[in-house]
Image (cartoon, grey):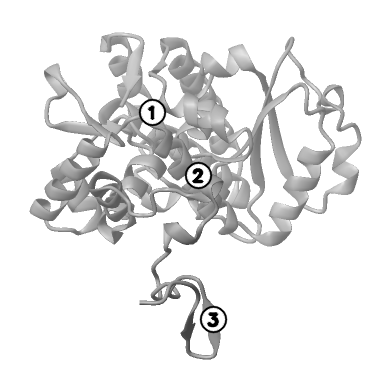
Amino acid sequence: MVDGPRQWGMATFAHPPPRRGYLNPDTLAPHMRIDVKPSVESRYTLDTIGNRTSIAILRCFLVSQRRTFRCVDISRTLGIPREKVQRRVSELVRMGVVMELEDECKGAFRINPSDPVSLALFKAFNHERYLAIDPHIRKELEGMVKRMDRDRLVSAIIYGSQARGIAERRSDVDALIVHTGRWIRHPSTLGIDEFALFLSIHIDLHLYNKSNFQAIPNLAVLDAILTGISVHGHDHLFARRMDPISIEKAVFLHRIEWCQSAFESSRIATGEGRRFFEEKVEVALVEMESLLSHGYTLSHREIAPKRRYRQRIAALERTIEKVEWPIAID
């Protein structure tokens, strides 16, 4: 047998051409040679994450307000048979992306924040939700963030109706800015003075320093953590969402005072003004009721007007006095 190049079709090769879809490591330079055949474990990992059911389950963990799920909850939420959910969740647990809770929460699962895949998936789902926002709003928000002092900016988060996907044409944009340093009350101190002159949309901007944001001073911050979409500082929002979250009694008491004030305003107002105040009171009351009973808030579309504002405020005040504070959000 003669050594040397061989004729393959119209070209001459020192080695036979690789089969379609197969990379021959012998033809690579020494510094480029890698193990092109994935191990059984890595193939299993990629197959598990790439499965449509697994993606739906991971989206449930990383996008939903709830951070802890049982298989039956996921099955009801996604409309997938319970046995199939259990099988996929078990695979994700073996991978390390999802972890099973112990002690009193045995049988419940949550995302594993220390696994690097979790952060990558959070960023992917965050970007998916961000692209669903109106392009004009995205352009204005990105322009606003660019004008900020990046050395002091920790994260920029969209929350409220825009993040929940229920915004209407007239809906404003709720944005929360987390920064370093002392308490800041005006956007100009972040390097965006007169930024409002450049925006053609109304942005309801809330500023919090990092330590104040960690303490969750009000339910708007809680909403931003649980349902927000990060425009900047994805790692910071992910870390805060994965951290233990608890609400102090003072936050609910402040919200109750606001409800009482808005209710009195609704009694004085007439027509559109009255409906406006009643809607705000209804949203605030359901927000507190669902947090105390379920550990998460409902979207505006899930809220059916119940009225009886005075009785519900009184009932909430009694419940607040009975609850052990602070309450943990799962």
- The residue under the point 27% across, 12% down is 323
Q: Is residue 50 left or right of residue 234?
A: left
Figure check: 322 above or below 147: above
Q: Earlier in the sequence, mark 3 or mark 2?
A: 3
Residue neighbourhood size for the residue with mark 3, other residues' Cα within 10 Å, grouped as few (<14), some (14–19), many (≥20):
few
| Whether label 1 touches label 3, CB < 8 Å | no
Q: Which amino acid does label 2 sit on?
A: Glu
Q: What residue type is labelled 1?
A: Pro
What residue does disc 3 label? 12
Per the model, the C-alpha gap separating discs 1 and 3 is: 53 Å
Give the secondary structure at mark 3: strand
Residue neighbourhood size for the residue with mark 1, other residues' Cα within 10 Å, grouped as few (<14), some (14–19), many (≥20):
some
Image quarter hosting the N terminus: bottom left
Q: Nearer the viewer, residue 144 or 27?
A: 27
Q: Nearer the viewer, residue 177 or 56?
A: 56
Q: Which of marks 1 and 3 is nearer the N terminus?
A: 3
**Residue 320 drawn at (x, y percent):** 33, 15
- The residue under the point 61% across, 52% down is 272
Per the model, the C-alpha gap separating discs 3 and 2 is: 78 Å
- The residue under the point 78% across, 23% down is 151
What residue does disc 1 label? 113
Q: Which residue lies furthest to the bottom in this view?
A: 10
- The residue under the point 37% across, 31% down is 115
**Residue 174 drawn at (x, y percent):** 63, 40
